[in-house]
Image (tube, rainbow, N blue to C red):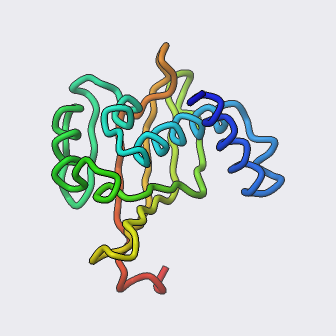
Amino acid sequence: MVRSLSIFCLTFALLLSGPSRLWADPLQTEVQAALIQGMEAWNRADLDAFLKGYVQGPEMTYTASGRVVRGIDELRARYQKSYGTSRESMGQLRFEDIECWPLGENYALAMGKWSVDFGPRSKAPKSAGVFSLVLRKTPEGWLILHDHTSRLDEKAKGNS
């Protein structure tokens, strides 16, 4: 059921993104499907399922806000501290404009935009930014080896 929903969401997203995305190569399709699966887990407030999209070993790195996090346990702790574990505190994650490039046979670079909507009752109803990911192809599928995420600076919105 979850796989069918993921495939439907991916197909719908590709249709909305315009005709050029309909003919995307397998790398783009596979990586985008993996990221959408993680997005769906986040939106269910299932942090453990979301983190299954990352390499589980100590070589996994995450950088944001001038800090480097190493390993899945540190990343889990960071997300729990920053976002909590409820649907309300985690908000609704959305990815847009995902692009992918091969980095050899079993690696890829992905870049895109993210946003989290926390709802109208939140002090900060929305947060957004960009990400770049290095992914590794494994028997389990494409997993994030390195995640560099930056938040959009509200003051600089119109200056890009």
Residue 85 vs 122, above or below: the answer is above
Query: Residue at 50% of width from left, 27% of height from top?
Result: 142
- x and y percent of residue 47 in the render? 31, 39
Quadrant location, the N terminus: top right
Residue at 74% from the left image edge and 57% from the top image edge: 16
Q: Nearer the viewer, residue 114 or 102?
A: 114
- Number of marks present in the image shown: 0
Q: Quadrant of residue 51?
A: top left
Position above or below: 79 against 113: above
Name the side, left or right, on which 76 lies relative to 126.
Answer: left
| Horizontal relation, residue 82 to residue 158: left or right | left
Tell me where residue 77 appears, x and y as whole percent. 16, 42
- Rendered residue at 73%/42% (across/down): 11
Left or right of 23 in this view: 37: left
Position in image of residue 70 (x %, y %): 19, 36
Q: Foreground residue, 41 or 134?
A: 41
Residue at position x 27%, y 77% in the image: 123
Question: Furthest-top residue in view?
Answer: 139
